[in-house]
Image: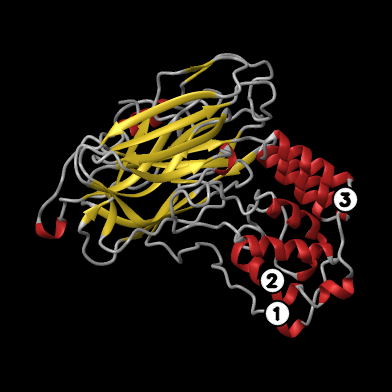
Amino acid sequence: MGKKDIYKTAKNNSEHNQMGSRFSWVLMGAAMMTTVGVIFLLLALFGVSPVLSSDEAVLEVSYTRDIAPILQESCQECHRPNRIGPFSLMTYEDARRNSWAIKQVTELRIMPPWHAKEGYGEFKNERMLKQEEIDTIGRWADAGAPEGNPLDLPPPRKFAEEWQLGTPDIVLDPGADFRVRKSKRDFFWSFVLPFNPKEDVWVSAIEVIPGASAVVHHTGLYVDPTGESLKLDKRSPGIGYPGNMEFSAYTILDFWTPGGTPQQLEAGTAWKIPADSHLVLDIHYAPDGKVHLDRTRVGLYLANGPVDKRVRFGVVGNTLFEIPAGERHYEVTASRKIPRDIHLVSGLPHMHYLGKEMKVWATLPSESISPMVWVPHYDFHWQQVYVLKQPLALPRDSRIDLVAYYDNSEENPHNPHRRPRTVYFGQNAKNEMCFFYFHYTVDDEYLTRGQAVGYDGLELRVGG
């Protein structure tokens, strides 16, 4: 069962009784956790949870005073109407009805969906609950989810009606609805957006709103300076053309994943869309057996003020591996030397369904180690761009190293092959990848002084 199926099941059950809510979250847990986690959830479903006496617990914790602020800060971004969460958590009744599920998924750290290891790197967009918040939720659920004094309820959190960052300067879409076929087989599709600037455009933030959120798994926004994308589009009937970006003309601008927060670049830095280039939106669709019409939109926020450094996109990875059938803990490593002084801004570990863990670090010329990001329980359905609190200085001759592990056994619930087979590198979701994508700036580039840097050997050329 894919993530979208799990969400649908969860949504349907949340409108019924408590057992329905328990069952939907158990299904979600099964898609996100290890076998041990699944067993724990099943035991919790049919077991008896310890319960504090109401008289004792009501005085200690309540929804209005203690739980509502946590949900506002860490849950309601996704758990509100017309968002990716399987049910809303905007009211007390929403929370009370799902209190047991909230307790279970927060204790197991399934939710909020943040998979980076705590203490291994520091991130600006971290959405991990503190242990004291998890404990508070547990005590509240065990006490019967008391409401508390209505006067303690904080003002409701206000969300943007549509765009999280406000109205974009430029809004782009493919120009027509795309029909997502009635199947359950993943595929990629690329759309040339109607944007061909006659001068360089500098962008400080990018936001994506999927049209058919039930089937849009993730997106990549690419720059095509050659016009090759237009030729591919013309050769393919209908709107767009089969994706996968299997040629070297494109460079990646940014990724979007469900539940993520748009990355707002620091003042004085920006992405560059060169004059006379084209923007290509590549979408990974995860069909759910129904027909959907999708018109995903891309919002561009232009840089305010002078841009001193261009934010570039690099990659370290391995494409020469094969994962034997039945292998539960197959190791793949990669390393890349940094040819000049840079500052790393953010990073995205990327594997497919067999991926189970990735650890990335920098080895400096002094041989000292700088932790970057460690995802011990990788989930293809919840990829995340991790934005560093402070850009990481990587002097020339530093290395970015990674180690990744894959589970190609029958025990892996995400394995796309019922009977495991040898899996190789490839663009299709049933193949595998081993990449760490990263945004960075070049130290000796000062655009406001006329000091620009061309291609520096780190920028990604897909297929090259």
Asked if residue 174 lies left or right of residue 251, the reply is right
Kind of residue at disc 1: Leu
Asked if residue 157 lies left or right of residue 457, the reply is right
Query: Could you say which disc has been placed on residue 153 in the image?
Result: 1
- Foreground residue, 372 or 439? 372
Helix, strand or loop under label 2: helix
Q: Going 56% across and 40% down the picture, which residue do you hit?
A: 217
Q: Earlier in the sequence, mark 1 or mark 3?
A: 3
Q: Quadrant of residue 340?
A: top left
Q: Are marks 1 and 2 in contact (CB under 8 Å)?
A: yes
Spatial CA span between label 1 and label 2: 7 Å
Q: Which residue is mark 3?
A: 19
Kind of residue at disc 2: Ala
- Foreground residue, 116 or 367? 367
Q: Earlier in the sequence, mark 1 or mark 2?
A: 2
Query: Could you say which disc has been placed on residue 320 in the image?
Result: none
Q: Which residue is mark 2?
A: 68
Residue 85: x and y in percent read 67, 53
429 w.r.t. 211: above or below = above
Q: Quadrant of the N terminus?
A: top right
Spatial CA span between label 1 and label 3: 28 Å
Q: Quadrant of residue 312?
A: top left
Residue 208: x and y in percent read 48, 52
Kind of residue at disc 3: Met
Residue 299: x and y in percent read 42, 56
